[in-house]
Image: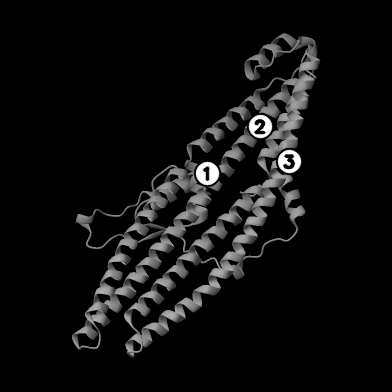
Amino acid sequence: MRLPRSLVSALISLTLLTAAGPPAAAADTPPEPLVLGLEQALSLAETLNPGVRLTAIQVSSARSALETAPAAAPAMAPALTAYLQAQYGISIPQQAITPQTVGQQALLTYEQAASQHLSARQQVRAGALQAYVTWQKAVATVEAQQAALERTRTQLANVEAAVAVGSASQYDLLQVQAALAGQQAALIGAQAMEEAARSALGQVIGTPIAANVRPEPDTLRSEEVALPTDLESLIAQAVSRRPDLRDAALDLAGRRLQTGLSADGTGAAQQVQAAASQYELALARARAEVTQAYLAAHGALEELRAREKALEPAREALRLAELRYDAGLATWVEVQAASAAALEAEAGRIQAAANLRLRLLELRQALGEL
């Protein structure tokens, strides 16, 4: 028997989001870290987010109304008029009712509710994606700061040993101690950012994320990304997929349907014209958003390539500076400068990778894929 998706998501939630592990007093070691994958986070957001749950209820209500809509016939015009007024707030002359009126309106209402539910799901997915990537970046930054701190601690031990035998000055020791304090402060700041990012994702999902939960490692590299080159084909995809265009098209269809039911032909025609204008505006907005997202993604990819190229020389310069210092050919100031440059290069790569991932997500959102 296959478990319902809602139950699966609930089980994931209990395991990953609320499983903070045993109390500290009852456990000698901290709980093992758990990994919350991107798809799991998106599934939880779709299931637990209050806004998405509300639109799901509206879809269910519209489906029930569609299933119970009477098969209209001219002889039943008074009852049908009351039904349309009660269900949809539409006042129409009795003679305008046809056998298809009620069914068409109920179907249109259901499609609109389904479209709004899809829009809500996509908005929540987009928010969860952005929050998740921000969390990944924060965790990667914490790891980079921890590595830098450990490297500085090793350097401190080496300098202390050198000072003890007279091969290094007290000034070098003060420099490395100051660097260590700076690294500790930077790590605390990075950890605070990681906690904030975790909290932000939990808010999008609709439930807190336990402290022992981690995101998937961000391993994005520029060589893994292949962006499309045909912008016009991307715009055509957006026209066929975007929920806002679907909403505008459904609104236009609804206005046209109500034109045939309304006694005020002029007013109804104006409403149709306004809906048509809204649809054209939605088309123009979609084209602009796809173009902007496409160009931004290309720019972010080029930035990541440049950051990756800068990282390897920075790491090599740090390695050589440490070797030169150990051989007595360089000062601690040179080592510290190379260490700071390497950390800056790594932070730049992390930021560029996160930026590219977000730009790719924005492109998918503009295309209506999320």
Mark 1 surroundings: few (<14), some (14-19) or many (≥20) residues within 10 A:
many
Which residue is at a point 46% across and 59% down the rendered structure image? 137
Mark 3 or 2, nearer chain start: 2
Q: How many labels does the image show?
A: 3
Q: Which mark is residue 72?
A: none
Lateral position of residue 222 relative to residue 337, left or right: right
* Residue 258, percent from left and from top: 75, 21
The CA span between labels 2 and 1 is 19 Å
Q: Mark 2 points at which residue?
A: 112
Whether residue 283 is visible: yes
Q: What residue type is labelled 2?
A: Gln
Q: Which amino acid does label 1 sit on?
A: Glu
Which residue is at a point 35% across and 67% down the rendered structure image? 146
The CA span between labels 1 and 3 is 27 Å
The CA span between labels 3 and 2 is 18 Å
> 202 or 182, which is in the foreground?
182
Q: Are marks 2 and 1 in contact (CB under 8 Å)?
A: no
Mark 2 or 1, nearer chain start: 1
Q: Which amino acid does label 3 sit on?
A: Leu
Lateral position of residue 160 relative to residue 363, left or right: left
* Residue 17, percent from left and from top: 39, 50
Q: Mark 3 points at which residue?
A: 283
Give the vertical position of 4 relative to 72 (above or below): below
Mark 1 or 3, nearer chain start: 1
Give the vertical position of 130 relative to 246 (above or below): below
Q: Look at the numbered disc 1 and give the secondary structure of its residue.
A: helix
Give the vertical position of 266 relative to 5 (above or below): above
> 24 or 344, which is in the foreground?
344
Q: Which mark is residue 46?
A: 1
* Residue 29, percent from left and from top: 25, 63
Residue at the farthest bottom position: 327
Quadrant assignment, res 25 = bottom left
